[in-house]
Amino acid sequence: MKKDNVLEVKNLNVSFRTQQGILKAVRGVEFELRRGETLAIVGESGSGKSVTSRAIIGILAGNAIHDAGSIYYYSDDVKNLKKYQELRETGNANEGKGETPAIDLMTIPEEDFHKLRGTKISMIFQDPMSSLNPIMRVGKQITEALYLKMGVSKEEAKVRAIELMREVGIPEPEKRYTQYPFQFSGGMRQRIVIAIALANNAEILICDEPTTALDVTTQGQILETIQRLKVERNLSVIFITHDLGVVANIADRVAVMYAGKIVEIGTADEIFYNPKHPYTWALLSAMPDLEFDKEGQQLFVIPGTPPDLHFPPVGDAFAPRNHKYALDIDFVEQPPMFKISDTHFSATWLLHENAPKVEMPNVLKARIERSLKKEKEAGRK
């Protein structure tokens, strides 16, 4: 464990029982979340992003199967968990000298998860209306999170709720406190959800596509709010999205997922300016670009569809859609994670020393060069 890690996901495998058989939704996912950083997890629908996040917060569906793997949460608060106390009695608790106590979230009972969920680990969902009770005033929905979890009085909870509403950018919070969700715009409803998520001083905030249902202007405002609160509260944020463009300016590191696996992970600069996996190339190429549009070319579309994870592919899952760059070995064996730098890793056979040397698509290369030039002119590079 690195000293500044708050979360470590190791070899996580999650499946689901379906009418068609066992669906392998998450296959060997591994990553770290450091204190005060934003880790973006990006990929197409069905890549396993949301399943991974729901495993972290303990809200997997009833037909889920935890096949293997661990999710270690590092915090002094785990000392209060029943499971940790049991481990301490048997001498198996993580209490090494100078180490932050840790617990494997995949092993704790619901009683313990209830103590962490909504307090130390919170989540913002895609649609705020599905997160809010439509017939309950928003003030009461915020205060419930406070006096049920934190044990504060209702009077103190009201004062704190109004402070939270002001903190997330709700105008006239004293007046809005007594209103219902339908009296708020989509962006304002999402701000209320953020206030509820942060009411109990969470350490980890999971954002599961929180801006997808919002217009572009409101989307930017919500992203700014999350980024500001992250800095002010030293939050660790996991941001789930299918759009790399959304996280370009807020992510410290980016993990790219495809078919239940992380295929590339690195700092935001490494992923945006030096991507190595053909799937990352495809995602970046599919982003709209004004300069590209001026050239009169068609927007790039990733061919084919993701694989059916009832029958996981033997080799590289992206190979059937990767006609230009796929190698014979891609259809036979899954590639390991190749190290590009201390912070940058990618699972593609193209990085093997015996692989043919290939360059990223010219369209993407030109786009990156333009971006770097603009960054340099702006004095940011």
Image (cartoon, rainbow, N blue to C red):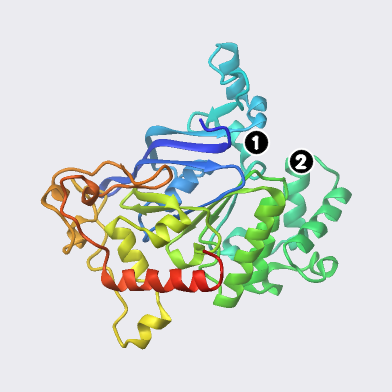
| Residue 150, numbered label | 2
* 283 to 86, vertically: above or below: below
Of residues 12 and 270, the one nearer the viewer is 270
Q: Is residue 37 left or right of residue 320?
A: right
Q: Would you place residue 149 above or below residue 99 in this image?
A: below
Instruction: Give the amino acid at mark 1.
Output: Lys
Closest to the observer: 178 or 343? 343
Residue 49 visible to an observer of this rendering: yes
Label 2 Cα neighbours within 10 Å, binned few <14 / some 14-19 / many ≥20: some
Residue 134 visible: no
Toward which corner of the image does residue 62 lie, by quadrant?
top left
The answer to which of marks 1 and 2 sits earlier in the sequence is 1
Q: Which residue is mark 1?
A: 115
Disc 2 marks a residue whose amino acid type is Met
Give SS at disc 2. Answer: loop
User: Residue 46 at x, y = what percent?
Assistant: 35, 56
Label 1 neighbour load within 10 Å: few <14, some 14-19, many 20+? some
Q: Does residue 72 lie above or below 159 as drawn?
A: above
Q: Residue at x 14, y 53 (%)?
A: 327
Number of numbered discs on residues: 2
Residue 228 is situated, as x and y percent measured from the top left of the image, at 68, 59
Residue 166 found in image quarter: bottom right
As displayed, is residue 152 above or below residue 96?
Answer: below
Where residue 289 sits: x, y (%)? 40, 78
Helix, strand or loop under label 1: helix
Q: Which residue is at 51% across, 64% downward?
A: 381
- Which residue, as the protein is rendered here, is positioned at the far right? 155
Q: Write the residue at 40% across / 33% down.
A: 69
